[in-house]
Image: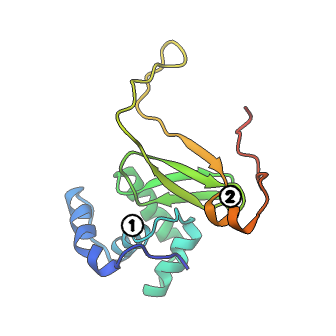
Amino acid sequence: MIPNKNSPRADRARVGESLRSRGLRLTRPRRIILEVVRATDVHPSVSAVYAQVRRRLPRVSLGTVYRNLRRLAAEGLVQERAEPTGLRVDGNTAPHDHFTCVSCGRVRDVPRRGVAPPLQAPARGLEILSHRVEFYGRCGACRRRGGPSTPHRRHDHGR
C-alpha cells in the first residue's frame, strides 16, 4: 500500500483543475491515478499505483494506468523516474532533487536551496534544459537499525 501524505478528498478539486487546465478530459481513471500519485511522497512504482487505483476502481487495467501515467508525465502533471527496478512516478513537479537510501531503497525529495548557477554544457553543441541531482546514502531509520552501509545495487551508473 502507498502511504498517503494528505487526504485524496482534499486534493480532488486541485486534480480536476490541473487536468482541465491542460485540456485533458477528466475521466475517472485519470483523476484517480493522479490523486494516488499526488497523495504520496514515496515515488511509487507503476505496479504500486495500479494496485492502489484498483482498490477504488476494480476494473481498471494495467495498460490504462500506464497510458494515463505517460500522458500525465507528458503534460507535466507527474514526473517519471526510470530506475534499475523499473519506472517510478513522482507527484512533486516542483524543481527538487532526490535522496535514495542504499539500505532500504526508499527515495525522498530533497528541496533545492537557493538559485543554482547556470550550468555549462559538457560538450560543444549541447543545450542544457534542466538537470537533477541524486544523493545516495542511508536514511535515519536504516542508520538506527544498523542496516548495511553498502549499496544493495550499484548506483554509480558506470562512473
Q: Residue at x 47, y 79 (%)?
A: 53
Where residue 48 sits: x, y (%)?
56, 72
How many angstroms separate mark 2 from mark 1 (CA)?
21 Å
Residue 138 as seen in the image, left or right of residue 19: right
The quarter of the picture where residue 71 lies is: bottom left
Q: Tell me the residue that label 1 is attached to.
A: 38
Q: Tag on residue 85?
A: 2
45 in relation to 149, above or below: below
How packed mark 2 is, by other alpha carbons closer than 10 Å (few <14, some 14-19, many 20 or more), is few
Choose between 53 and 11: the one closer to the eye: 11
Q: Residue at x 33, y 72 (%)?
A: 31
Mark 1: which secondary structure? helix
Marks 2/1 in contact by CB < 8 Å: the verdict is no
Figure coloring:
rainbow
Which numbered disc, 2 or 1, marks the residue that appears first in the sequence?
1
Choose between 3 and 149: the one closer to the eye: 149
Where residue 10 sits: x, y (%)?
27, 77
Choose between 23 and 85: the one closer to the eye: 85
Where residue 138 sits: x, y (%)?
67, 55
The amino acid type, in three-letter code, at marker 1 is: Arg
